[in-house]
Amino acid sequence: MGGRRVVVEADGGARGNPGPAGYGAVVRDADTGEVLAERSESIGVATNNVAEYQGLIAGLEAAREAGATGVEVRMDSKLVVEQMAGRWQIKNAGLRPLAAQAAGLVRRFDAVTYTWIPRERNRHADALANAAMDLAAGKVPKAATERGPASAAADTTDSAPTGRARATEVAAQGSTARSSWEPRPAETATRLLLVRHGETEYTEQRRYSGRGDVPLSSRGLAQAGAAARRVAGLAPSVAAVVSSPLSRCTATGGIIAGGLGGVPLKVEPDLIECDFGEWEGKTFGEVRERWSAEMDAWLASTDVAPPGGESFVEVGARVRRAMAGLLSAYPGETVVVVSHVSPLKIALRDALAASDAFLHRLYLDPAGLSVLDIWPDGGMAVRSVNDTAHLAGL
């Protein structure tokens, strides 16, 4: 692999869990060990894991600014390393948006690997994080020579700013990722208009409809037209319509794109519906009768897949990948996303930091519209869910 290779060392923590929190990140040249950048920030009250993810995000952003094409991430957080490597699922709903933001940054590099290291080998990032935590707790950070040999040694690299100086600088600016009751400027967000496809025969017959390519019914086509008019009224300026590859979505998306004056229709494979395996095409009643125990297990856990199918954990991984790709490709723009019940429910669950029970309590109508704003720092605002006013009278 050509280009510049770097090592990102990142850490985060809280004085209490949750408590006053902060993170630190260091970017080093992979060949020389030279420090290329430091990042440190007080993030108010948060958990250890949130702070660790924020440290990873800051380190990846700094690596990108340094012109890196390849990154080795080193952290003493086993949870973050294993989750980002795809070996552990992300059970905590509050961490999913942060993982999605990190995944979006990862896509900008040629290669990113993850290595767990013991805390004593992560002293530099740990020192930066501790300085930030001190600020979050309202303490004046001690000078490097007063923090003990481990922290002092971490701050002696060339002319890079010390952890204390960097943390003080960022704390003065404030954390843009911090929760707030105040409205945020919509023009700086990427706006996603989430549209479920119109009806098919399977929808009307109450059948499981996953990977089977069932076309829109005549009513579904009418619903897609109504959704197109609604979208055009809400968002006259749209960068793209991005669709699942199945025809019920591409047909809906094509009608919407046409109503926007020829906005490009793009296909994203990760937006495809859940694979329902042996349940595909069966009515809900047939599945309940034949696979009662399997259905109970499926409803009880997102780790469980229908026989021969796909679990919601697996669907969630690709939905987050798709969302991160959209944020990377269309920063600050409006995008129409045409998909299915399962991917759209998962996107909304993640945006609302809801539990998995949300997936079985939310109803999304055919051609229903939801609006989601996502800011560059990972902040989110769900502006509407399952708006169907445009379907009245059909």
Image (tube, grey):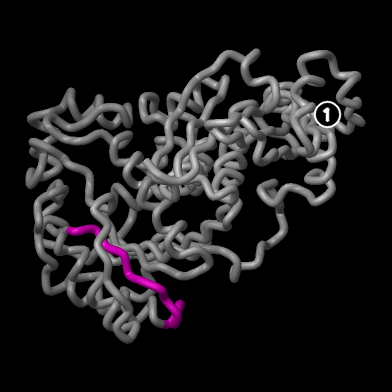
> Amino acid under label 1?
Asp
Pick whichever, 2 or 175, lies toward us. 2
Percent coordinates x, y for residue 210 in the rendering:
16, 48
Residue 50 left/right relative to 263:
right
Residue 224 in which image quadrant: bottom left
The N terminus, quarter of image: top left
| In the depicted structure, whether residue 300 falls above or below residue 179 | above
Which residue is at a point 51% across and 42% down the rendered structure image? 353
Which quadrant does the C terminus fall into? bottom left
Q: Could you tell me residue 322's position as x and y percent?
A: 35, 51
Percent x, y of residue 93: 49, 36
Front one among 306 and 338: 338
**Can the viewer see residue 360 in this picture?**
no
* Relative vertical location of residue 83 with respect to residue 116 in this rendering, above or below: below
Above or below, 325 relative to 35: below
Q: Residue 141 appears in which quarter of the rendering?
A: top right
Q: Nearer the viewer, residue 74 or 284?
A: 74
* Residue reaching furthest to the front: 32
User: What residue range appears in magenta?
Assistant: 233-245
Residue 229 shown in magenta = no
Asked whether residue 237 is drawn in magenta, I would say: yes
Residue at 18% x, 23% y: name it: 293
Image coordinates for residue 17, horizontal then vertical, percent: 68, 23
Q: Which residue is mark 1?
A: 134
Q: Residue at x 13, y 67 (%)?
A: 216
Q: Taking 62 as reference, is 76 above or below it?
A: above
The quarter of the displayed image where residue 248 is located: bottom left
Q: Give left or right: position of 33 versus 315.
A: right
How crowded pointer 1 is (Cα within 10 Å; few <14, some 14-19, many 20+) is rated as many
Q: Is residue 212 visible?
A: yes
Instruction: Name the residue located 41 percent from the left edge and 76 percent from the top edge.
Output: 238
